[in-house]
Amino acid sequence: MTDRSRWALLSAAALVVAVWALVGGRSLWFDELFGLHAALRPWDDFVRFVRDHDAHPPAYYLLLRAWTRVFGTSELAIRGLSAVLAVAAVAALRATARQRLGEAPAAMAALALAASPLFLQAATEATRYALLTLLYSAAAWDAASAVERDARFPWRLAALGALLLYTHYLGAVLVASLVVFAWWEGGRRGLRTVAAAFSVSGVLFAPWLPVLWHHLSQGRFDPPWRPALPTTLPLQLLHVVGFGGRVAGTASYFSVSQAPLWVELVLAVPVAVVVGLGMRTLWSRSPGLARLVACCAGLPAAALLGVSLVRQSMVAYPRYFVFALPFLAVAVGSLAGGVSARAVRVLAACCGAALVALSMGSVGLWGSNLTERMGDRRALAAQLRARLQVGDVVLVYPRWESAGVDYYMPELRDRYVALRSEWTDQGLRELREQVRVSAAAERVWVVQGFPVPPAAFEAVYRQLAATHRVAYFGEFDGVRLTLFVRRTAR
C-alpha cells in the first residue's frame, strides 16, 4: 500500500469515526428505536413480531442483537455498528478501485464516498442502510470477478445474495441488477455464472417467503403516510446522492424538496457534470467496471423511479439510494489522472469544488438539526419526567411511539397506555374507548408522534377536550407532549 492509498483510506475511516463520535449521541428516531426493540425481542417471539409489525427482513436486527450483547444499547453504541459497516464499505471500494484503476483513482474514490453527507448519515444511524450498502457493493465486486474468471460456482456471491435478500426487500432489485450486468458483460456464460449463485441465494431465502407474502398481503410496502410523487424527484435524487441535499431547501435524507424548480436545476448541474465526466472516463479506462457501475447504480434507481411514477407516490425515500454511492464514487475516482483535455479538467475541477462546498453546507445544516424533524424523544422524556405526578395517566399515540418511552423512560414501562393506532373503524372504536377510560384521571398526558389522521385526532384530542383543558404543550422537533387537566380540578 503506497502512502497515498494508505492515507486516503485512513482519512476516510477517521472522517466516518469522527462524525459518529460528534453526532452519534443525538436522540434516537423512530426507525432506530424500532430496530433496537425488534433486535431485543425474545427468540420465541422474534419472527412473529417482525411479521406482524415490520416491512423488512430480519438480518440487520440479528446483527444488531449480537452487537448490543458486546457493546450495549446506548445511542453511541448501537450506531457504532453502522460506522463499522461504513468503514468496511470504504475499504472494499478502495481495494476494488486500486486493483482495476490504480492508486490515485482508488484514493479519490474512497475519499469521495466517505465525504458524502448521505453516506455519513447512513454511517451514523442505527438502521440497515450501511449494511445494505456494504453487502451490495461487495456482491457487485464479487460478481464482476466471477464473470471475468468464468467461475464454476461463486459460493461467496451466493452467500452475499442471500444476505442482501435478508437485509432489505430492495435486495431483490439489486440482485436482478447484478444479473443484468452479468449478461451484459459476459453474455450467456456470465449469466450462467451468477444465476447459479443467486439460485442458491433464493433457496436460502425460501424460509422467509411466508413472511414476505404476509407483508405483501397486508400492504406494508405502501403505507398510507407515504408522500405523493414529487414532480422533480429525479432532480432531488441527484441532489441527495451528490451532496446530501438540504442546501436551499432541496431534498434531505428523509424529506422531499421545498426548493423552486430553477434552484433544483441549477444545483443538479455540478452533480450531473461530475458523474457524467466520471462515467465517460471510466468507460474509456475500464469498460467492464463502467458497465457494473451503470447497472448497479442506474438500474435500481430507474426501477424505483418507475414504480413511483406508476403508483404516483414516493416508493423509495431519498435515504434508500445510499446503495448507489460506492458506484458513483468509482466514477468520480476515475477522474484522477484520467482526464487529458485541459478544458475538461477545468470543468471537472470547478464542478467538483462546487460539490465540496454544497456538501459542507449540507453537513452544516444537518449538524444544526440532527433529528431532522423526526423527533427529539430524549428532550421530550426529560420534560415529561420533570412534570409527571403520582396518579397521572400517560397516553402514547401511535402505539409504536411507545418504543421511545420504553428507551428513554424505562420507569414508565408498565404505566403508560399505548393507544390503538389501526386506521380502521374497529381500531378507532377501541381508541375512543381507551381515551374514555383514561379521561377519568385528573391529569392526562399525551405523547404523540406521527402520522395522526383526522379521525384519530378527533378521538384523542377532541374527546379529552370535552372534559379537560390543556395545561401544557411542547413540541420536540416533530413529537409532541400535551398535558390535559380536568376542568373541575382545583
Image (cartoon, rainbow, N blue to C red):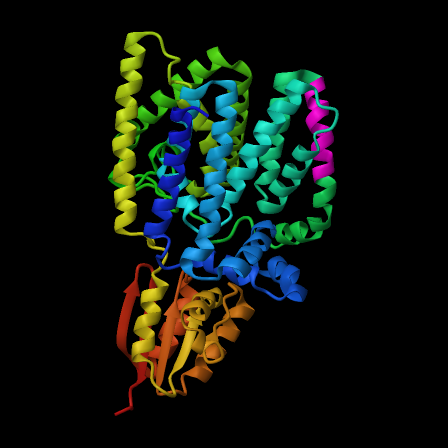
In the rendered structure, the answer to whether residue 121 lies left or right of residue 154 reads left
The x, y position of residue 396, in whole percent, is 43, 71
Of residues 172 and 340, which is closer to you in this image?
Answer: 340
Give the camera-side residue of 138 and 94.
94
* Residue 156 lies in the magenta-colored region: no
Q: Position of residue 246 (x, y in %)?
A: 30, 41
Indicate whether 121 appears above or below 378. above
How many numbered marks, from 0 up? 0
Q: Is residue 234 visible?
A: no
Q: Is residue 236 left or right of residue 176?
A: left
In which image quadrant can residue 160 be found?
Answer: top right
- Please indicate whether residue 166 sits to the left or right of residue 483 in the image: right
Main secondary-structure element of the magenta-colored stretch: helix
Rendered residue at 48%/22% (across/down) = 98
The residue lying at 48 percent from left, 34 percent from top is 91
Is 313 located above or below residue 370 in the figure?
above
**Residues rendered magenta in the picture:** 189-201
Residue depicted at 34% across the width and 26% down the height: 271
Q: Is residue 212 visible?
A: yes
Q: Picture coordinates of residue 195 (x, y %)?
A: 71, 29
- Between residue 359 and residue 314, name the one nearer to us: 359
In the picture, the quarter occupied by the C terminus is: bottom left
Task: Compare residues 186 and 19 and report the one nearer the observer.
Answer: 19
